[in-house]
Image (cartoon, coloured by chain):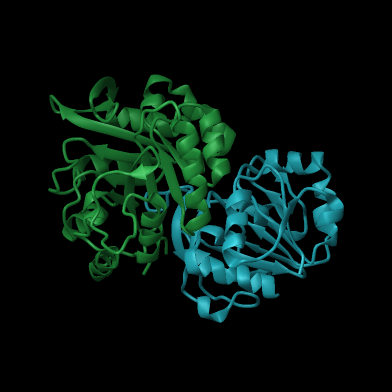
């Protein structure tokens, strides 16, 4: 039986992990490769690396980093952050990334989803969607949730899949950072609406939140950053708790 | 032992080579027929779409070379599907080494397509180590090889399908051993020891 996935997300800037971490055992908590290996050994099912650097050298640094990660870890990983061309994606997949995610570029040039899917296959194209509720409508935002767009969440998500997205990563900007739980209602709607897997992001604060997102919103995967980095939740404990609640996970 | 990884436009050639590096195995990546023919064992990776990949294999005469191999060959993911006779993915005639048809999963609310993630191996036999019964491997695929007399491990996703198969010297897995943590490593080792 296919298991639900737990996905730690690492923010990367200039080849280093940002946001503090609480892994005292790490020689260098800023080293994404070492942190990734630690998560892999603790039972993370996948990893997401989000590159937030804005330098000219960005692409080269990221490709080098992806190569070191792929050498080291033996679980799948996705790379995202400012990816906008078939060439970018080709270089990252060649370096060993399993999937890439696009966000703002897909909104400004939706055709890129078709092009990427045709060139590399839907299975490695994740479209990340950030949205928040405005006047009772879920509105898609870009650029880290700062810029509103004309897209409504559900129609946009459907369009992304029709254009060739193999997976949708939805972050509720209203829940992100609150630690008060995932956005259950829109996630359930996405799960019901879309024929591809949905990854929930934004709001994880306790193990109960993961139980809720898997049972109530029925998503395929849940992503979180700080609660894992600060070791407020350990992945093995989380997975035992999920299994105790009848959720099928890889132990 | 000389191990060759068939170099072509498959998406996971790099990841497979990293997995072999982690195992400390010497190998060459090659599209040279003599090198591949002369290897003791051959890895045939694969990620992508069946018809364009078959076109590519034909263009480089790999469609003639691969079926002629007599040493152990391991097909991975699309590499497994291409060993079969025919795939429903764009109605593609494949290499025809294993006489079975590759089918598409039917999507429903609990079975999204592609199947993406960790699923468990059951009824493991033949070349798949018994200790891996119920262990988890990483799958990403929309098409599957049905259960048949060639099946060496089964998996369930709305339907029972072949997670691993073997026919004579042709071994294959639907999942990605290069991304399947410790289980994947044991599978690669099992093939290398075969």
In the rendered image, residue A118, in percent from the top left (x then y), is placed at 57, 32
**A7 or A161, which lies in front?**
A7
**Residue B49, horizontal then vertical, whole percent:** 62, 42
**In which quadrant of the rendered view does residue A145 lie?**
top left
Q: Residue at the spot x=22%, y=43% of the render?
A: A202
- Counting the numbered discs, the total is 0
Q: Position of residue A193 (x, y in %)?
A: 33, 39
> Which chain is displayed in green in the rendered image?
A
Question: In screen coordinates, is A22 left or right of A249?
Answer: left
Q: In this image, B107 relative to B19: left or right?
A: left
Q: Residue at x 53, y 54 (%)?
A: A71
Residue A63, relative to residue B75: is it above or below?
A: above
Residue B89 rendering spot, x and y as whole percentages:
63, 44
- The foreground one among B169 and A16 is A16
Q: Quadrant of the C terminus of chain B?
A: bottom right
Please tell me in which quadrant of the rendered image residue A215 appears.
bottom left
Vertical arrangement, residue A73 with respect to residue A144, above or below:
below
Residue in the foreground of this view, choosing between A17 and A83? A17
Quarter in which the N terminus of chain B is drawn: bottom right
Residue visible at 34% across and 53% down in the picture: A7
Left or right of A102 in this view: A182: left
| Res A97 visible | no
Instruction: State the residue at coordinates (83%, 55%).
Output: B35
Q: Quadrant of residue A229?
A: bottom left
Question: Residue farthest to the front?
Answer: A27
In the picture, which chain is cyan?
B
Can residue B90 be seen here? The reply is yes
């Amino acid at each position: 039986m296919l298991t639900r996935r737990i996905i730690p997300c690492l923010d990367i800037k200039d080849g280093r992990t940002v946001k503090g971490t609480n892994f005292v055992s790490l020689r260098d908590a800023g080293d994404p490769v070492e942190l990734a290996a630690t998560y892999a050994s603790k039972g993370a099912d996948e990893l997401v690396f989000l590159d937030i650097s804005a330098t000219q050298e960005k692409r080269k640094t990221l490709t080098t980093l992806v190569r070191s990660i792929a050498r080291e870890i033996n679980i799948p990983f996705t790379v995202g952050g400012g990816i906008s061309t078939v060439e970018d994606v080709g270089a990252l997949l060649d370096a060993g990334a399993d999937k890439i995610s696009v966000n703002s570029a897909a909104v400004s040039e939706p055709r890129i989803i078709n092009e990427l899917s045709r060139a590399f296959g839907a299975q490695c194209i994740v479209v990340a969607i950030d949205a928040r509720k405005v006047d009772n409508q879920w509105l898609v935002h870009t650029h880290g949730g700062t810029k509103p767009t004309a897209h409504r969440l559900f129609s946009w998500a459907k369009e992304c899949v029709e254009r060739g997205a193999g997976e949708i990563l939805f972050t509720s900007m209203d829940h992100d950072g609150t630690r008060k739980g995932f956005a259950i209602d829109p996630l359930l709607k996405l799960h019901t609406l879309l024929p591809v897997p949905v990854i929930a992001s934004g709001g994880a604060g306790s193990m109960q939140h993961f139980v809720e997102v898997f049972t109530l919103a029925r998503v395929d995967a849940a992503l979180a950053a700080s609660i894992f980095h600060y070791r407020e939740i350990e992945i093995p404990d989380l997975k035992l708790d999920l299994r105790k609640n009848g959720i099928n996970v890889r132990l | 032992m000389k191990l060759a990884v068939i170099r072509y436009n498959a998406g996971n050639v790099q990841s497979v080579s990293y997995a072999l590096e982690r195992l400390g195995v010497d190998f060459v990546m090659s599209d040279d027929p003599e090198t591949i023919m002369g290897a003791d064992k051959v890895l045939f990776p694969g990620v992508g779409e069946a018809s364009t990949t078959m076109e590519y294999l034909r263009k480089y005469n790999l469609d003639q070379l691969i079926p002629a191999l007599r040493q152990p060959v391991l097909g991975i993911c699309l590499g497994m599907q291409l060993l079969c006779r025919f795939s429903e993915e764009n109605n593609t005639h494949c290499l025809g080494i294993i006489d079975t048809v590759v089918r598409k999963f039917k999507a429903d609310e609990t079975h999204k397509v592609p199947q993406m993630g960790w699923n468990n191996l059951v009824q493991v036999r033949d070349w798949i180590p018994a200790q891996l019964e119920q262990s988890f491997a990483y799958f990403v695929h929309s098409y599957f090889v049905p259960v048949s007399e060639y099946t060496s491990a089964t998996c369930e996703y709305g339907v029972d399908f072949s997670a691993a198969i073997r026919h004579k010297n042709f071994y294959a897995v639907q999942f990605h051993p290069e991304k399947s943590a410790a289980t994947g490593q044991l599978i690669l080792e099992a093939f290398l020891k075969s």
